[in-house]
Image (spheres, rainbow, N blue to C red):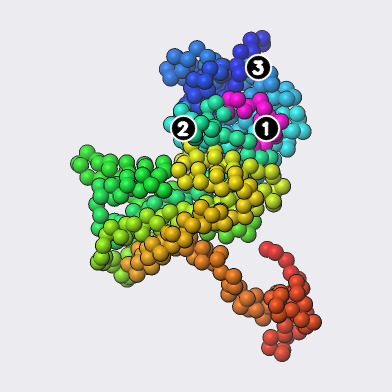
Amino acid sequence: MTEKAVGDFGLIGLAVMGQNLIMNIADHKFTIVAFNRTVAKVDRFLDNEAKEFPNIVGAHSMEEFVLKLKKPRRIMMLVMAGKPVDDFINALLPFVEKGDIIIDGGNSHFPDTTRRTKDLAEKGIRFVGTGVSGGEEGARYGPSLMPGGNEEAWPYIKEIFQSIAAKSDGEPCCDWVGDEGAGHYVKMVHNGIEYGDMQLICEAYDIMKRGLGLSAKEMADVFAEWNKGVLDSFLIEITRDVLRFDDDDSTPLVEKILDSAGQKGTGKWTAINALDLGMPVTLIGEAVFARCLSSLKQERGRASKVLAGPTPNFTGDKKTLLANLDQALYASKLISYAQGFMLIQNAAKEYHWKLNKPSIALMWRGGCIIRSVFLKDITSAYRKNPDLENLLFDDFFNKAIHNAQSGWRDIVSKSALWGVPTPAFSTALSWYDGYRTKDLPANLLQAQRDYFGAHTFKIKPEYASEKYPEGKDNHVNWTGRGGDVSASTYQA
């Protein structure tokens, strides 16, 4: 088969995201070749959505698709994560050549991307796993793109990726993230932070609804006001719109939606990875568990009839409470992002990745679901100090967390007294208090472990002695009946 190589870029997968990304690329004057496993979908796309674009070309077989691409071929897949990605790679391998580039733009788990990068490098194929965020509209008009993998590919895809990406203050929300699975890892953490942001907003909504008795329209006005300040973000904006949306009977549709939340797994992956790395990413974890609790709808219905608790009864100034809620939401978001970047930093050490932290924050400033004004300050913090140990050590965020603290504490305490669950607000504050505490009660925990299992303990430097040397694993016979033999020490 002889085909003229006309395509600058090829894309496999013509679901809505794929179609929109193709039209975005075509808008930027690149010639793009489209392919789908169900080839009839290619013709439907060319005859309908793509008919105004002479630079969108269709292909009806994998071989034709590859032959229509200029070398080195740049091929992107937007297919379901897991086995379908491997299946498409295997289908491409007979036709691609050394130096060609295969890009996975789905929500793949980062260890799979690491494996594929290594396996394909041995065959001379440059593999890239890229996070894509922004939904259907982002794909069409400018997504956030988070590419990682084989860095040799970056010079060949940089122009296209940065052309089609969202822009923030003129800068593209796309840069090279790092090695192997780093791009999909950063997208995973992005999705985890998204879980946290959404849960915090839901808790603020619940406090306003049950604590203050506000209507959907009144709450929409509050979110609209918040969107003019430090909380200005895509998620606050859409929450305002959702609360203003009425059903056909002129009542808020949101109040008719079943309170059982779904999830696709990326938030769970973030929480599991945090546990694997020993990182206290508590807010994302609580956001995942809150969705799990919401799914117990029938059981919660039965529990509501037999488990008693307080009923909110607010007396006081609503304006003050709403100002405190604004601060609680801002402070808790700060903690969520601080935890997220802690996780990313530790992943870089664990997996030996070179990560571009200022660029990660920049990539999230526009085009993606968690885009917000707030991320401009995070970009600035990491540009000022790329080795920043924690976001809360930056002057701007340090001042912000202290300014928000009294309102934050008021909201968490009131919610507990009202019986309104605030797992994300509460864990953010608990983490903050734990993080700022020089001496935590883990000394007692270590003594307990040594008592029942001879798991040993280390002594505080100021109390080190010949009996208890500093930095050594010490064991005590707490009862006089045990022995002096300690258990093996290891990190589980």
Q: Which residue is mark 3?
A: 70
Q: CA–CA distance between discs 3 and 2?
A: 27 Å
Q: Which residue is mark 1?
A: 127
* Residue under the point 43% across and 62% down: 405
| Earlier-in-chain disc, 1 versus 3 | 3
| Badge 1 vs badge 2, beta-carbon distance below 8 Å | no
Q: Which mark is residue 55?
A: none
Query: In the orientation shown, which residue stands out farthest toward the bottom?
Result: 480
Kind of residue indicated by mark 2: Gly
Q: CA–CA distance between discs 1 and 2?
A: 23 Å
Range shown magenta: 147-161
Quadrant that contains the N terminus = top right
Secondary structure, magenta segment, majority class: helix
Quadrant that contains the C terminus = bottom right
Determine the secondary structure under disc 1: strand
Q: Which residue is mark 2?
A: 138
Kind of residue indicated by mark 1: Phe
Using a 10 Å C-alpha cutoff, classify the residue at mark 3 as few (fewer than 14 neighbours), some (14 to 19) or many (20 or more).
some
Q: Confirm whether residue 256 shows in the render.
A: no
In this rendering, the answer to whether 469 lies above or below 397 is below
Percent position (x, y) of residue 29?
53, 17
Q: Confirm whether residue 388 shows in the render.
A: yes
Determine the secondary structure under disc 2: helix
Determine the secondary structure under disc 3: loop
In this rendering, the answer to whether 363 lies above or below 425 is above
* Residue under the point 32% across and 45% down: 224
